[in-house]
Amino acid sequence: MKLLKSAIVTAGVLLLSGCADITKDKETVFVEELLKRMTLEEKIGQMNQVNWNGNYSHVKKGMVGSVLNVTNINELIEMQRCAVEESRLGIPVLISRDVIHGYRTMFPIPLGQAATFNPELVEKGARVAAIEASSDGIRWTFAPMVDISRDARWGRIAESCGEDQYLTSVMGDAMVKGFQGDDLSSPTSIAACVKHFVGYGAAEGGRDYNSTGLTENVLRNVYLKPFESACSAGAATYMTSFNDNDGIPASANEFILRSVLRNEWGFDGVVVSDWGSIAEMVPHGFAENRKSAAMKSVNAGVDMEMESRSYIENIAELVNEKKVSERDIDNSVRNILRLKYRLGLFENPYVDPNSNVVYAPDHLQAAKQAATQATILLKNNNRTLPLNEGRIKSVTITGPMAHAKHDQMGTWSFDGEKEKTVTPLEAIGDMLGDKIKIIYEPGLAYSRDNDKTGINKAVKAAQQTDATIVFVGEEAILSGEAHSLSNLDFVGAQSELISALTATGKPVVMVVMAGRPLTIGNEIDKCDAVLYSFHPGTMGGPALADLIFGKAVPSGKTPVTFPKTVGQIPVYYNHNMTGRPANRNETLMCDIPVEAGQTSLGCTSFYLDSGFDPLYPFGYGLSYTTFEYEGVKLNSVNFGKNDIITAVCTIKNTGDYEADEVVQLYTRDLVGSINRPVRELKGFKRVSLKPGESKEVTFELPVSELAFWNRNMQYAVEEGEFHLWISPNSKSGQPVSFRVD
Ligand code: BGC
């Protein structure tokens, strides 16, 4: 047995040492040779992923293909030793963990990272996470999550890149590249897992795990887009989602998993189920028992089962009964072995227990830069911000998020350490403690705190100082998986705290740290300036201190529409037009005359109590400076389907701060074989401008990028008239027209 194993390992090493152009063949030979030697039980073992439970004997028996959540490095090495040295074929185990927005060094939550509109920075964040995680033996992460999220009630909006398929695609691709690096076999590369396939973000009512009812048209034009893009970016794995779409649970959807993913996109990596999602087809009412669930998932093309044991307990019997084919099992095992081969695990299965790269200075620097660029300036009346340390002699720092070391890290910070988090209170103290007087009165102990006794103390402090900075928002636990809300107002007594502080008449800067957009228009109205920072991670404090005191200038833009009220949800910028669009002079409820006639309001599409517009549109964010956009120039007004549109706009910094602006390109297809969105993001660029400086910003847009899945479910550009904008957000700017013929 020993001989066989070492022969395989030697063959593997020899095969790995050849030139690049024959790598694929070597990979195939290696995988096929190994597959031939495997028993059915060993194959089924590869398809089994377990939450680490200390069961080394299962590993020795070859019953485990992958583990998740081994947190002790010595156990991890011992577990791998059991697989490599004591299992019959010595196949290494693939070690996985949710490394979503950082491993130890926590970056802003993905929604915040999307707000940077800076894919290079997002890629760097994923690279840092990969370097840190792989130094602890992790070679597979369950990220990026590229679920389109148009509903802020859904707690997992925090983990998403927001509502737009283009932005999500760009950011998802950047994360894939960052996690996987240039070469998957490098010891610092970790396989990405694009999740949750598919439609999960459209959960009815924003309630996690709930059903979705997406048509093929909406799936293809919106929800599948970032998944397809990640496939082209080389994503190694996909995860099926928990939801049923149109009655079919994702882990049994062979149309998505076989026809689309494998046949249309040519994916040759691994598909893993979500945690327990195969067995959960029983409570769904889609399978009678776990055996039938296993059969449906194997037949649909799910290669590996995460955690729920339906595969390991039932596949052998299902093969004997000919309810699943050994050919499908072989294909799944091929995918798994191929991934392990590509990760270099056969050659190099062990992690060096002495490598320690966490919290490297450049990791912290990148996390700070990400938190800085992720922060969105929503309001700045009378140029309240930046606070000027020369003019302000004293400041009150208050609010439950001012010094919330744990909560600032956000959801999915399994391995983040709160001791390492630098809060705004600490950072402002470090920056200015010896220059100005700082009074800290939290007011409330945590976001849900309803004990108002601290509010008076905060107000007294505010009365004595020149300005107040109130840090409010949500604790990390209020967003993320299974943490949906039906009300998005401030929790606890935060609203009362803000009212009491603003009643002092002193300038109040509100800084919101949250996992989602909150419906806080009333509080925003009361404050002089507002910064919105989706949970910003380890270095959130220094980033915010720099922004508040003018050492950095805000440049984040909203990656999702901010609703005024929960009732406006779903609200997103790239909606279709109704036949009766709202005009901007809607009569709201309070202005309706008594006994007004039924049709007197004009019969358009809006809410009587909140109108049509959201609180803030997609792509919105202010700066300490101002930017002027000149008219857009196109290289032509008539294009053929193979042409490239060149759109140019000059942007001028008309204020007095050097700053970045995120310049956005949108188009609209005016008439289609199906209704087309009122605007679609097609590109963006982050541009740095000195005061008074102008730059020409050029976008090259191939006409082919105007294609969509049409009425006949074909992906094509349709002829006709289009509009194009280059603008600072999804609502503003004047379009120019062109035709495609
Ligand atoms: C989540 C996944 C996650 C998995 C493993 C599930 O509950 O939906 O996103 O990767 O657990 O922790």
Image (cartoon, rainbow, N blue to C red):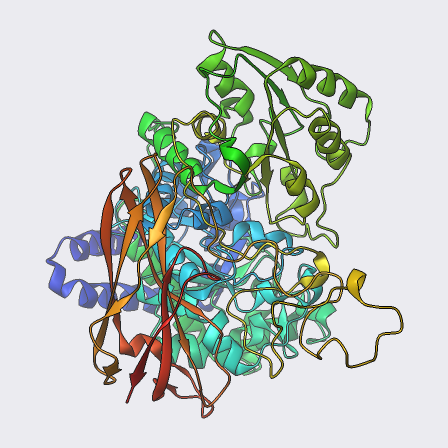
The residue depicted at 55 percent of the width and 43 percent of the height is: 412
Point out the residue furthest to the top here: 434
Q: Residue at x 52, y 46 (%)?
A: 57
Left or right: 454, with 727 as reference point = right
Residue at the location (71% across, 24% down)? Answer: 504
Against 236, residue 178 (above or below) is above
Q: Is residue 334 visible?
A: no
Above or below residue 56? Residue 432 is above
Image coordinates for residue 29, horizontal then vertical, percent: 23, 67
Q: Position of residue 463 (x, y in %)?
A: 69, 17
Q: Nearer the viewer, residue 62 or 533?
A: 533
Is residue 366 at all visible to an observer of this figure? Answer: yes
How many marks overall? 0
Q: Is residue 524 left or right of residue 533?
A: right
Q: Is residue 110 above or below residue 449?
A: below
Q: Is residue 711 left or right of residue 657?
A: right
x then y, percent, for residue 91? 37, 53
Question: Residue 581 lies in what quarter of the image?
Answer: bottom right
Q: Quadrant of the C terminus?
A: bottom left
340 and 39: which is toward the camera: 340
For the point 77% across and 36% down, which residue is it?
A: 492
View extreme (right): residue: 595
